Amino acid sequence: MVDKPETGHENAGERLIEASLALHDLKGWFVREVLPLEAALMQFLRRSGRDSADIADLRQEVYLRVCEYAEKEIPHPVKPLVFTIARNLLIDQVRRGQVIPIEAMADLDAANVAADTPGPDRTIMAREELLLLRGALDRLSPRCREAVIMRRIEGLSRREIALRMGITENTVSEYIKIGVRTLANSLYGEPEAARRPV
Amino acid sequence: MINSTEAARHSSAASRAEEVASAWIEQRDRGDWSPTDQSQFDTWLAQSLENRIAYCRLEAAWDRTERLAALHAP
């Protein structure tokens, strides 16, 4: 699956073109159809009682399998596929002896039913979106939030942010990187109620 | 980037892909993006579907924060 960049130039070039096309095609579909399901998917996966690193791996594995499927044929609708893949991943782990709590298994159906409500991202209004964004911003650590606000809202350069905050440019980069990941987890992975301003 | 066994133990495959993806987003957003950067970025994207998924997800969230500028508008 991993293409090795050290192979022939022509092939590498072709692969790059394919990959960028794949990124373009993938992104529109994935962001529109799959990401709005993330809060329900995370809720479903968390009931397995795994720690957060395992949950993140499971989420990534679900996305990988869904996108591998979508590269051949776009699933309509995608939601049943997402939850079938998630359920099968959990069941596979049980079979391999990585036991999960019985009540978590019993909750799988309940989670699936709960996931049948439409993703909030499709219906929220612009004002609601701003509330969600502000809620996600509120969940960053104070220094991280400061850096993200300066970069994203005030449009300051990395150097200007470093000067204002009295930190190195590399530390600014670290805050931005953590901010990007934390914002994604808040905006996509948390239930709607937890996404509003604190 | 992982410099201790403790960090390695808690660092999942997903979080490693996301860590690199967030570094690319930060770098693209910095304003000194070069053709060399673009080429390295393209190579990384081409390496795996997992990389492309991690990047799409984080970029989508980062793009949404553009709207936050409206809260800041005078």
Image (tube, grey):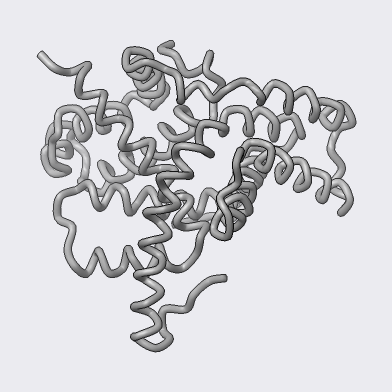
Residue shown at the point (63%, 36%) measured from the top left: A79
Location of residue A99 in the rendering, given as x and y in whole percent from the top left corner: 87, 42
Query: In terms of depth relative to the viewer, which is nearer, B56 or A34?
Result: A34
In the depicted structure, whether residue A7 falls above or below residue B55: below
Location of residue A70 in the rendering, given as x and y in whole percent from the top left corner: 56, 53
**Is residue A87 among what the camera can see?**
yes
Residue shown at the point (21%, 45%) measured from the top left: A168
Locate the N terminus of chain A and report the quarter of the image it occupies: bottom right
Residue shown at the point (36%, 23%) measured from the top left: A137
Say left or right for A193 vs A8.
right
Tell how many labels: 0
Location of residue B55 in the rendering, given as x and y in whole percent from the top left corner: 41, 50
Residue A144, picture quadrant: top left
Residue shown at the point (76%, 33%) measured from the top left: A49
Query: In terms of depth relative to the viewer, which is nearer, B41 or A147?
Result: B41
Query: In terms of depth relative to the viewer, which is nearer, A50 or B48?
Result: B48
Location of residue A149 in the rendering, given as x and y in whole percent from the top left corner: 24, 27
Locate the C terminus of chain A and report the quarter of the image it occupies: top left
Say left or right for A63 vs A142.
right
Say left or right for A29 vs A88.
left
**Is residue B11 among what the camera can see?**
no
Residue A187, picture quadrant: top left
